[in-house]
Image (tube, helix red, strand yellow):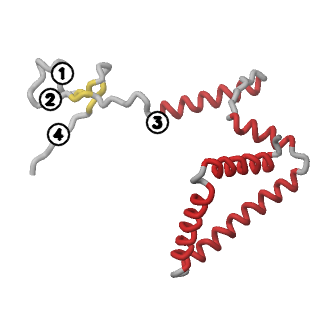
Amino acid sequence: MASTISAPLSLFSSSVAVDSNCSRQSANAPPSCVTLPAPSLPLHSHAARTNAYYRKITRNVVAMATGEVEAETVETPEIVKTIQQTWDKVEDKYAVTGLAVAGVVALWGSTGVISAIDRLPLLPSVFELVGIGYTGWFVYKNLINSSDRDAVIQKIKDTYKDVTGTN
């Protein structure tokens, strides 16, 4: 059986691990002595990020305790501002909320009905043919002549004005 002799390793300021039985100079070291470079740690280790995070929290707590709170401005998107302004203008918020809930329930119910019809073996094909036929008839009746197109566009604009309430 072969026996191994182990000597303690030490870490010097040159960041090289050296066997304590060997000399530090590799020129005078016997061939059995090997020096290995110390492992380098990544610059952005988890500990460094965690410490920076806790320093930031501590800084915020100290600032709040002393009354020196920095005002953090968060820009809200334009659509959120528009929705908030529109919601503030609404007089009967309960009615609008009820209509929104009823709309969601109606949408959910209609998707259930459509999926139930879609599972029937013959009806989806028939509905597809009806849809294609109606689309063809609508195009033939309303979009081929320019006077008919202008009438459809005017009707769409009038309906839009009626829905939005603009003049």
> What amino acid type is highlighted by mark number 1?
Ser
Label 1 residue SS:
loop
Total tally of numbered discs in the picture: 4
Residue at image location 60% in from the left, 76% down from the top: 116
Asked which secondary structure carries label 2, the reply is loop
CB under 8 Å between discs 1 and 2: yes
Contact check, label 4 and label 3, Cβ < 8 Å: no
Whole-angstrom CA distance, mark 3 to mark 2, is: 35 Å
Compare marks 4 and 2 and give the one earlier in the sequence. Answer: 4
Closer to the observer: label 3 or label 2?
3
* Residue of label 1: 23
Label 2 sits on what residue type? Cys
Q: Residues within 10 Å of mark 4 (few under 14, many from 20)?
A: few
Residue type (three-letter) at the residue carrying disc 4:
Ile
Give whichever of discs 3 and 2 has the lower sequence position. 2
- The residue indicated by pointer 3 is 46
Label 3 SS: helix
User: Which of the 4 image quadrants contains residue 104?
Assistant: bottom right
Locate residue 84, reporting x and y percent: 79, 40
